[in-house]
Amino acid sequence: MATLTHRALSYRRHPTLDPWFPIRQWINQLEVSSDRIAHLICRLIPCTCPFERTFTLFGQSIHIPPLCKLNPLYNELVFLRFRALSYLSDICGEDITPYIC
């Protein structure tokens, strides 16, 4: 159901106005059909933004917010990871707790 909603939202963009449309469409059409591919996707796409940090410098805390939302393909990659996790748990019957943060 989440995939259908996501696909409906991503196709609302007009292809001539969105330069990322072909890549979005390609990622949305990828099907996870192998446990090896699903494991690879889950290892490559992190579950949280790796760029969010809090530094303490001279007693002052500096917080760098998560920058993943600036990635134009962020939603497509998150849903691809979700489809891979769903494939591993539903079809393969594997434990996906190592991939959940």
Image (cartoon, helix red, strand yellow):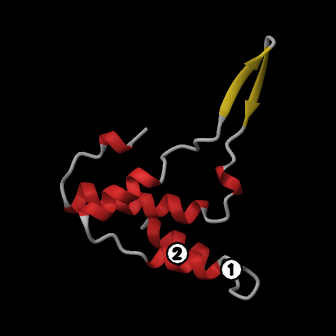
Q: Secondary structure at mark 2?
A: helix
Quadrant including the C terminus: top left
Q: Residue at x 50, y 73 (%)?
A: 27
Q: Is residue 98 left or right of residue 21?
A: left
Disc marking residue 7: 2
Residue 96 higher or lower than 39, as above or below: above
Q: Residue at x 25, y 68 (%)?
A: 34
Q: Nearer the viewer, residue 36 or 13?
A: 36
Residue hosting label 1: 13
For residue 19, what is the image quadrant? bottom right
Three-letter amino acid code of the residue under disc 1: Arg
Question: Residue 83 appears at what percent x and percent y?
Answer: 38, 63
Q: Is residue 87 above or below residue 99?
A: below
Compute the Cα span from label 1 to label 2: 11 Å
Q: Residue furthest left?
A: 93
Where, quadrant-wise, is the N terminus in this rendering?
Answer: bottom left
Near mark 2 (Cα within 10 A), the count class, few <14, some 14-19 or many ≥20, is some
- Measured as percent of width and height from the top left, residue 15 is found at 68, 86
As drawn, which residue projects farthest toward the top?
Answer: 59
Q: Residue at x 53, y 69 (%)?
A: 6
The percent position of residue 24, horizontal first and vertical second, equals 58, 75
Specify which label sits upstream in the sequence, 1 or 2.
2
